[in-house]
Amino acid sequence: MSDDDLADIGESAESGNSSGTSSEDELVETRLGLTIIGCAILLGIVGDILAATPLGVNLPLFTLVFVAAAAWLLIWRSHERDEIAVASLGLALVFSGFLVWRDSKLLGVLNVVAIVLLLGLATVRLSFARAHALGMVEYLVALGKTFAAALVGAIELVVDRMNWREVEQQARSRQVVSVGRALAVAVPLLAIFTALFAHADVAFSNLVGDLVPGDFGGLMIDLVIVVGVTFVSIGLLQAILNGHPGEPGEEPRKERVSRLELAIVLGLLDLLFLVFVLVQIRYLFGGKHLIMVRAHLTYAQYAHRGFFELVAVCALVLPLLLVADWLRGGLKRHRDPLFSALAGVLIVLLAVVMASAFQRMRIYQQAYGLTELRFYGTAFLILLAVVFAIALVTILNGRRHMFTAGALIAALVSVVVLNAVNPDNWIAKVNIERFHQGKKIDLAYLNTLSDDAYATLRGARLSGLRLDERKSTDCSPDWRTWNWSRSKARDLYCGSASAHR
C-alpha cells in the first residue's frame, strides 16, 4: 500500500472520529449500500428479461428474485423483530402466484394492489405479538415511507448514505470509482439524447443504426426498463432494510370534539337511517306488487336505481365512524359507552341497508344477468359487512387498536377467496343457466370474459361466441406470459384446431 493510501485512510479515520461515527460502521454501511445497488442492478436485468404482457409467470419469477434478495439482505443485516417483514414478503410471493392462476384483468389488478400493499408492510419492524396493536396511522406511515423510498430512495442512498471515499480506498483506485460513477450518470443521459436526436433527424438515425447493431428502439426500451427497475428496487430494498419502527403508542390523545357534539351528529344520522330502514322494511317483505304500486317502478328499475347508491352509503359510513373515533381522543383502549351505543345503533341500521342492497342486486341479476361490475359490487358489500363486524367488536368495545390489523387481514383474505371462486367462470355459469331457463343472454358481453371462463363458454356451445378470436388461441405463446387459465384455453383451442386439419 502506498504512502498516499495510508494518508487517505488516516484522514478518513480522523474525520470519522471527529463526527462521532466509527469508520468501521461507515464501512459496513457502505458495503451494505453497494450490495443493495448490486442486487438492484440484478433485479433490473431480470426485470428486462421477464418484461412481457399480459402478465403471467414473469411477475412471480421477478417477485421471487426480489423476495430472495430482500430476505438475504434482512438476514445479513440481522434485525431483531422482522417477522412482519418476512411474512409480508412471503405473502407478496403468494399473491403474485395468483397471476399465474387466473386470467381476469380486474382480479389481476386486485392481486397487484395486494402485492404493493404487502411490500409496503414489509417495512414494518415489528413482531407478530404486537402487530395487532398498530393503528391505522402507523400502517399508513409505513406505506407512505415505502412509496416515497421507491421514488427517492436511490438518490438518498447514492448521495447521502454512501461513503464513496471508503469505496475508493477499498477499490485501491480512485479513477475506477470515478469512472464508474460517471458512466452510471452519463449512459442514461446519452441514451435519452441519442434517441431524441435519432427521432429528429433521419441522417443521424441512419448513422446510429450503422453504429449500433440490432434494433435501436428495442435497445432503448431495454435500457429504460433496466434503469427504472434498478432505481425503484434500490429504494424498496433500502426501505425494507431500514424499516419503520411501528411501535404502538398508548399515550392519551387530546379530545378534539366534545362528547355532546359527536352524540348530536351520530344521533341525527341514526334517525335518518332509521327512517330509511322503516321504509325499506316494507319493500323488503312487501314483494314485487308493493314496489310497482307504491314506488311506481318496475322491479328491475327499483333494483338498478338503488344498489350502487346504497353501497356508496355503506362505504362512506366506515370512514365517518373512524374519523369520529379519532376526534373523540382518549386512550386507544378507552371505551365511551355513549359513542359505542350511538355508533352501534348506526351499524345495526346499516345492516338493514346492506340487506336492502343485496335484495336489489338479487332482483337486478334475475332480470338482466350477472356482470363483473355486479359481481364485484356484491363482493365489496360483503367485505364491508365483515369490516363493520370487526369494527363492532373492536372500536366499539374499547379495542380499536385491533381494528386496522383485522380489516387488513379481511381485505387480503377476500382477494384470496375471489381467486378461489373464479369470478369470470361464475359469471359465465350464471348467465348460461339463465339462457337454459329461456331468458335473454348477452353474447357480446360473455365474449369479453377472460380465459378463466373459456372452458365453460366452450362447453355451452352458444352460437355467436367468437372464442377463436381470443389471444389465447395463439398456439406458440411467449413463455414469460404463461398462465394456467390461458394455457387450458389454448390447449382446448389448439387441440380442436389440429383435429380439424
Image (cartoon, rainbow, N blue to C red):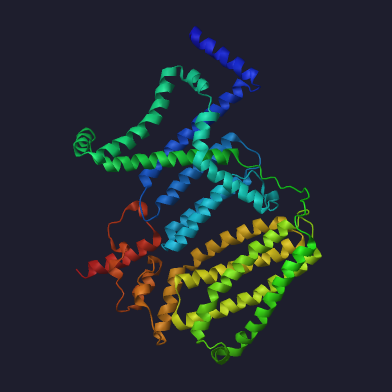
x then y, percent, for residue 479: 34, 52
Res 318 visible? yes
Q: Is residue 313 above or below residue 138?
A: below
Image: 85 above or below 372: above
Residue nearer the viewer, 96 or 208: 208
Please give the name of the residue rendered at 67% of the width and 67% of the height, measured from the top-left corner.
389
Q: Specify the quadrant that holds the C terminus.
A: bottom left
Q: Position of residue 14 (x, y in %)?
A: 61, 15
Drawn side of residue 389 relative to residue 467, left or right: right
Q: Residue at x 44, y 57 (%)?
A: 99
Does residue 122 appear in this view?
no
On screen, residue 211 versus residue 154, left or right, reads left
Q: Position of residue 446 (x, y in %)?
A: 37, 73
Depth check: give the residue in front, 78 or 212. 212
The quadrant holding residue 184 is top left
Residue shown at the point (38%, 80%) measured from the top left: 441
Residue sitting at x 65%, y 79%: 276
Residue 497 x %, y %: 24, 68
Q: Is residue 247 above or below residue 397?
A: above
